[in-house]
Amino acid sequence: MYMTYKELEKEQKKPLEEKIKASVHAIASGFAVCSHTPAIAFSGGKDSTVLWDLIRRYFPEEEKRTHVIFGNTGVEYPESLYFARRLGREWGGARFHETKPLRTER
């Protein structure tokens, strides 16, 4: 969705409850069209952590079948790597997958 800077500023000023409601609606729309096993990309950053948390809170049945993929690029800070792996074990268990993409030649 394209949005102007003014529109973005307006969205950012909304109360947290409204932001959560809009996010939950967007996630529900994604699950509604997903006919296969759902998966999310997880970096361990704030955005993917919040996405995973919202799925856990608002979509517990879908969360049980959602796979979480962490792409270990090999350049993460040790603390970030530790956090992603720890959360993956605690929240995802066998549905947490750490991948190590092949390096490019440059």
Image (spheres, grey):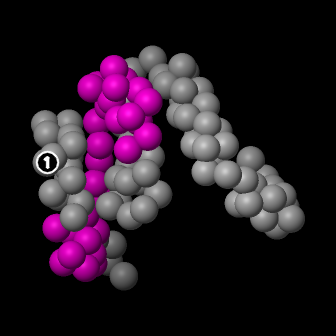
Q: Quadrant of residue 13?
A: bottom right
The quadrant of the rendering that contains the C terminus is bottom left
Q: Nearer the viewer, residue 64 or 73?
A: 64
Residue displayed at 35% across by 35% down: 56
Start-end of magenta stretch: 53-82
Q: Is residue 69 magenta?
A: yes
Residue 95 on image: x %, y %? 20, 36
Residue 26 in view of the camera:
no
Residue 99 on image: x %, y %? 22, 54
Q: Amino acid at mark 1?
A: Arg
Residue 98 on image: x %, y %? 20, 53
The residue wearing badge 1 is 89
Residue 1 vs 71, above or below: the answer is: above
Residue 94 vs 102, above or below: the answer is: above
Residue displayed at 67% across by 51% down: 15
Residue 31 vs 16, above or below: the answer is: above
Q: Quadrant of residue 60?
A: top left
Residue 4 on image: x %, y %? 84, 61
Residue 61 in view of the camera:
yes
Along the horizontal axis of the image, is 23 left or right of 68?
Answer: right
Residue displayed at 16% across by 67% down: 82
Q: Is residue 73 magenta?
A: yes
